[in-house]
């Protein structure tokens, strides 16, 4: 059995990346980058366990995508690493960044082959260009580019990270705390994704799948005489509204479920739980905006949406166009791709008795095509 745990760091905010998509959620085929990288390491069969650090808001979503151990990361790379190390039980740990998307098995094997020879084994690249430091040309043979993954003694790495100092990699932390490091040949293919242009240096990554993703949503709300009615993002001129934790906009709630369904990201209760006081009486348009932002961050764009409102009352024919306009703007699609229909239940059921409204919604999504940037 392997005596090495793999930690993949994926909790960052991609602040330097320059796209609405977080780089860890770029799609490789159908697969988000973080999962693609984890799968690639997993196929080597060199690790007892794989731990992935995630932004706290993304933990439940990552867990729903995979069977790896997903733990909440911290504000910095080092904090995330500390939190992941708490779950490591093996004597050795290999740490890599999700942004190193094209690490090949031979590089990993070079690191493992030296694991007993130093506290940390580090892949490096030599420089071929002239190097100037503080306006002085220095010997480039004395300069190395440090890469990840790095293989460390788990106990030594834990001890090194007890320091309050922040380090950019494991080897710097270990060396600063008296440990020794051994350098091995790195790989040009293990280029790190930091900016958009870095994607052009990673030919191992396939483009996103061209599939269309489809989702459906359904919601109902009873009437409440003490509230005003918001439906499809539009105020309806009647003297009653909907019983709900938020503003009760049943059309937007169904639409959010359709969007999340297409994305495979659960449902509205998972994203905006009704036992959370921060959502009490909230404008559902704000919930929809947050949902769309999440889709974009996760590498998805809305193609079109369609809702059917079943209501015996109120009458909605004069409001449908305004609903289309409001919802299309939030979804960031042309109005022609946001359809709104209204119907009745021929006086059948609770809707027919004018006790509430039901809405069915459908939505289609595409993957964000990062190859076009």
Image (cartoon, helix red, strand yellow):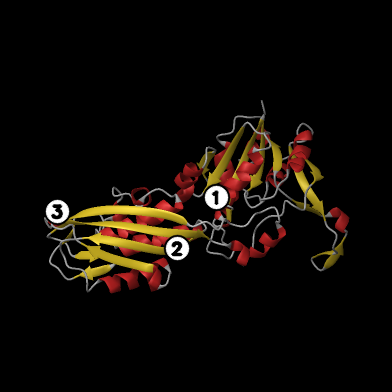
Q: Nearer the viewer, mark 3 or mark 1?
A: 3
Q: Nearer the viewer, residue 56 or 348?
A: 348
Q: Nearer the viewer, residue 166 or 261?
A: 261
Q: Residue 289, position in %: x, y?
A: 39, 63
Q: Earlier in the sequence, mark 3 or mark 1?
A: 1
Query: What residue sits right under mark 1 in the picture?
Result: 11
Say which mark, if any, is on residue 348.
3
Q: Nearer the viewer, residue 357 or 11?
A: 357
Disc 3 and disc 1: Cα gap in Å? Answer: 50 Å
Q: Residue 19, position in %: x, y?
A: 56, 64
Horizontally, residue 338 falls left or right of residue 237, namely right
Q: Residue 121, position in %: x, y?
A: 75, 40
Secondary structure, mark 1, is: loop
Q: Residues within 10 Å of mark 3 (few under 14, many from 20)?
A: few
Horizontally, residue 195 falls left or right of residue 241, namely right
Q: Residues within 10 Å of mark 2 (few under 14, many from 20)?
A: many
Q: Nearer the viewer, mark 3 or mark 2?
A: 3
């Amino acid at each position: 059995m392997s005596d090495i745990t793999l930690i993949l760091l994926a909790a960052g905010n991609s602040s330097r990346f320059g796209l609405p998509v977080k780089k860890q959620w770029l799609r490789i085929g159908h697969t988000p980058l973080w999962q693609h990288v984890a799968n690639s390491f997993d196929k080597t069969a060199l690790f007892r366990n794989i731990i992935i650090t995630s932004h706290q808001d993304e933990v439940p979503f990552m867990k729903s995508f995979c069977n790896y151990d997903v733990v909440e990361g911290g504000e910095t790379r080092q904090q995330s690493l500390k939190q992941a190390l708490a779950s490591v039980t093996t004597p050795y740990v290999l740490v890599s960044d999700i942004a190193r998307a094209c690490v090949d098995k031979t590089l990993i094997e070079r690191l493992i082959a030296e694991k007993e020879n130093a506290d940390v084994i580090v892949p490096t690249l030599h420089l071929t260009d002239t190097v100037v430091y503080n306006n002085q040309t220095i010997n480039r043979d004395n300069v190395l580019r440090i890469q990840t993954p790095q293989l460390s003694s788990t106990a030594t790495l834990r001890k090194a990270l007890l320091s309050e100092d922040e380090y950019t990699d494991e080897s710097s932390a270990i060396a600063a705390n008296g440990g020794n490091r051994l350098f091995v040949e790195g790989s040009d293919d293990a280029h790190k994704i930091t900016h958009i242009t870095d994607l052009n240096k990673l030919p191992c990554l396939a483009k996103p799948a061209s599939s269309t993703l489809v989702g459906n949503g359904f919601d109902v709300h009873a009437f409440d005489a003490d509230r005003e009615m918001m439906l499809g993002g539009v105020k309806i001129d009647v003297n009653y509204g909907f019983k709900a934790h938020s503003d009760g906009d049943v059309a937007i709630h169904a639409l959010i479920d359709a969007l999340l369904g297409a994305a495979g990201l659960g449902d509205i209760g998972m994203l905006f739980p009704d036992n959370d006081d921060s959502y009490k009486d909230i404008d559902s348009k704000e919930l929809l905006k947050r949902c769309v932002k999440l889709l974009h961050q996760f590498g998805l764009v809305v193609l079109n949406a369609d809702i059917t409102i079943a209501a015996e009352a109120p009458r909605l024919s004069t409001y449908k166009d305004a609903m289309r306009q409001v919802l299309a703007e939030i979804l960031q699609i042309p109005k022609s791709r946001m359809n709104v229909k209204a119907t009745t239940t021929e006086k059948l059921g609770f809707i027919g008795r004018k006790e509430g409204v039901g809405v069915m919604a459908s939505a289609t999504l595409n993957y964000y095509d990062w190859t076009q940037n």
